[in-house]
Image (cartoon, rainbow, N blue to C red):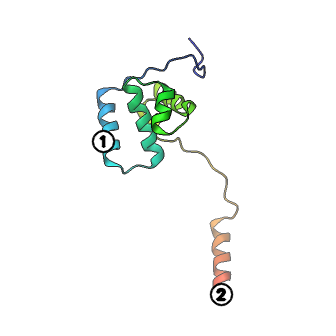
Amino acid sequence: MKDKNSYNVKLKIKLKAAERIKVKEILSKGKESVRVIKRVQVLDLFDQGYTSPTIAEYVGVTAETARRIGWNYKEGGLERAIYELSRPGMERTLSEKQANYIIAMVCRFS
């Protein structure tokens, strides 16, 4: 198998019928974030047989981004491709009790 990051690998994606319906639904409702809509557009164009450079030009992303979305679909399905995984993020600097104390202190002097 070729390396998934190789530029010589032609990524072919065919959505399942239920996934195709969900893609069309997301594109028609417009209630998702722009990032999600662009990812869905990429998958829709892959499903129609376009290549990542062409998709990149149509959607306004890089070819690498289009390939990454395609590989995320291949590895984890539709949900993994269009929605970001949650990230742990940075730990809070102040506890909730400390933040409330500061707010109370500021409000007292206002």
At horizontal 64% and vertical 80% (from top left) the residue drawn is: 104
Q: Which mark is residue 50?
A: none
Residue at horizontal 50 percent and vertical 33 percent from the top? 56
Q: Amino acid at mark 1?
A: Glu
Image coordinates for residue 33, horizontal then vertical, percent:
44, 49
Q: State the residue lying farthest toward the right.
A: 93
Indicate the secondary structure of the residue bearing disc 2.
helix
Tell which circle, 1 or 2, labels the residue nearer the N-terminal end. 1
Residue named by callout 1:
25
Drawn side of residue 9 relative to residue 50, left or right: right
Front-most of residues 93 and 28: 28
Residue 96 position (above or below residue 109):
above
Q: Secondary structure at mark 1?
A: helix
Tell me where residue 27 appears, x and y as whole percent.
34, 42
Task: Classify mark 2: residues with Cα within 10 Å, few (<14), some (14-19) or many (20+).
Answer: few
Q: Amino acid at mark 2?
A: Arg
The residue under label 2 is 108
The relative height of residue 59 versus residue 15 in the rendered view (above or below) is below
